[in-house]
Image (cartoon, helix red, strand yellow):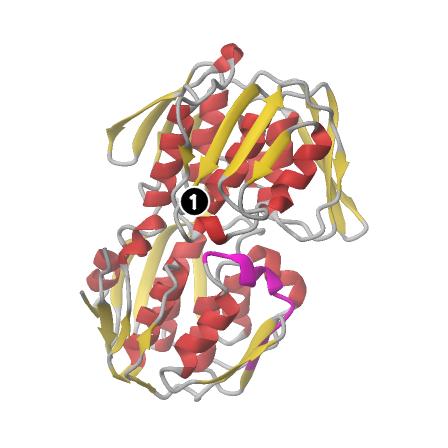
């Protein structure tokens, strides 16, 4: 079902809102809880469609998962019995993180499973995961040239490997480490550029010994298996990728003054905040504390006159999902913003480079597509023309970025479909309206 939605010029956003639970940690809590011995209790779980797909998949593998309150979930893990053969296809919906991590987790058990997903997920590459898993000993059959559906077969007797991913990818690293849980020996991932470390942090919380040490500008992550994971208490912090949308909305909307509470400040996830600060944005972090092994804080944001920057390529791993909304901020900056060496965006839910440039140019922003990046010439803080209907390509971040752009447009900006926003940010519309944003279904 499509849901045509538009946003119109808004003024002085104000108020205090709470960032929704982090999507990355929510996926991992369900997967590790399903593998562990005992009952894992999760608070603050993001109840978006992607996370519910992961919950359904882990149920298919034999875990018992139930909701006991708003964001409160219990996972009774498979423990020593291990993940079980699913009775039918394992449908991962639109959850790219979910399917890739679950493949890694399942690979360590004697199992045969066929993974499927929706049209968007079925267009995304899986060989980046399947290649190292094959080195460890699994057999896989991809029915559409490295894309879903994929049937994975394992005898549960994997060999540990030392693997250097050709691209910076926390999903690849995580899949290998999860498979390594049930191998005998040392499994290692050598990263040229460090990626988000949520899997390492959570594996430690579930009883695994994981070491990380610097190596030639990157890092080497090591895990010795086999390990019997033990259930844990997980408190899910707020998602910085979701917090990005109200934060950019406040920065570009004159008179705005907001606070976004409970935002995870893991340094592998804060690249966007660093960019916005470099652009002259007012972002003040207060009330630092720890939750679920992660540092969180409240972010105070005020409308700011932004300036264009060249984003350091090495920052990409810490903000790979935030480039579309950064491009929206760049549209209102003084000067040019260059975002390059981000080819990974071409294999997300959509080709996010092409889709971002299309949403900007359709609404009067001077922007161009580079071979592996984007260039945006900002207007110095004026409103944009707007009036476009943005093709979202079933990509939640493109949809939300377009609606934030519309908050400072002369004519309403519409998206062809907003229903997929529920995959990552089910409270987006209520949260933005509570701040005063004019977003209308």
- 393 in magenta: no
Compared across the picture, whether 216 is left or right of 364 comes to: right
Q: Which residue lies furthest to the front in this view?
A: 143
Q: How crowded is mark 1: few (under 14 residues within 10 Å), some or many (20 or more)?
A: many
Confirm whether residue 254 shows in the render.
no
Q: Residue furthest top?
A: 81
In this view of the protein, which residue sits in the foreground, 397 or 239? 397
Q: Is residue 311 above or below residue 288?
A: below
In this view of the protein, which residue sits in the foreground, 351 or 338? 351
Report the span colored magenta: 337-349
Compared across the picture, whether 422 is left or right of 381 comes to: left
Q: In this view, does 40 lie above or below 296?
A: above
- Residue under pointer 1: 95
On-image quarter of the C terminus:
bottom left
- 340 in magenta: yes
Q: At 31% across and 80% down in the image, what residue appears?
A: 388
Compared across the picture, whether 181 is left or right of 258 comes to: right
- Position in image of residue 258 (x %, y %): 31, 64
Compared across the picture, whether 275 is left or right of 252 comes to: right
Q: At 43% across and 44% down in the image, what residue appears?
A: 95
Count of numbered badges drawn on the protein: 1
Corner quadrant of residue 254 = bottom left
- Position in image of residue 381 (x %, y %): 39, 86
Q: At 47% across and 19% down in the image, what residue appears?
A: 85
């Amino acid at each position: 079902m499509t849901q045509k939605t538009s946003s119109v010029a808004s003024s002085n956003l104000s108020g205090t809102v709470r960032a929704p639970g982090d999507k990355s940690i929510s996926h991992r809590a369900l997967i590790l809880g399903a593998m562990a011995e005992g009952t894992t209790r999760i608070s603050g779980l993001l109840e978006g469609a992607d996370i519910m797909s992961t919950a359904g998949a882990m149920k298919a593998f034999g875990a018992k998962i139930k909701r006991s309150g708003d964001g409160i979930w219990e996972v009774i893990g498979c423990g020593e019995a291990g993940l079980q053969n699913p009775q039918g296809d394992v449908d991962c919906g639109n959850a790219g993180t979910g399917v890739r991590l679950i493949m890694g987790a399942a690979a360590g058990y004697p199992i045969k499973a066929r993974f499927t997903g929706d049209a968007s997920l079925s267009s995304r590459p899986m060989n980046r995961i399947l290649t190292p898993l094959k080195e460890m000993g699994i057999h896989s059959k991809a029915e559409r040239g490295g894309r879903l559906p994929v049937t994975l077969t394992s005898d549960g007797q994997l060999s540990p490997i030392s693997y250097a991913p050709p691209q910076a990818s926390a999903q690849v690293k995580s899949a290998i480490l999860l498979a390594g849980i049930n191998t005998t020996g040392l499994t290692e991932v050598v990263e040229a550029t460090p990626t988000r470390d949520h899997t390492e942090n959570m594996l430690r919380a579930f009883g695994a010994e994981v070491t990380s040490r610097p190596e030639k500008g990157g890092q080497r992550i090591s895990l010795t298996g086999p390990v019997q994971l033990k259930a844990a208490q997980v408190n899910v912090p707020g998602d910085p990728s979701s917090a990005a949308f109200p934060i950019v909305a406040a920065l570009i909307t004159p008179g705005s003054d907001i606070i976004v509470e409970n935002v995870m400040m893991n340094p592998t996830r804060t690249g966007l905040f660093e960019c916005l600060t470099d652009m002259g944005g007012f972002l003040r972090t207060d009330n630092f504390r720890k939750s679920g092994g992660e540092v969180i804080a409240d972010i105070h944001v005020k409308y700011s006159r932004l300036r264009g920057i060249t984003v350091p390529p090495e920052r990409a791993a810490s903000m790979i999902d935030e480039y579309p909304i950064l491009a929206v901020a760049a549209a209102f900056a003084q000067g040019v913003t260059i975002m390059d060496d981000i080819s990974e965006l071409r294999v997300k839910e959509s080709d996010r480079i092409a889709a971002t440039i299309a949403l900007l140019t359709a609404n009067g922003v001077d922007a161009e597509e580079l071979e592996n990046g984007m260039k945006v010439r900002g207007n110095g803080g004026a409103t944009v023309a707007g009036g476009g209907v943005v093709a979202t390509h079933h990509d939640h971040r493109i949809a939300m970025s377009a609606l934030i752009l519309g908050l400072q447009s002369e004519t309403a900006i519409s998206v062809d479909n907003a229903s997929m926003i529920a995959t990552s940010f089910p409270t987006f519309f209520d949260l933005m309206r509570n701040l005063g944003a004019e977003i209308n279904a």
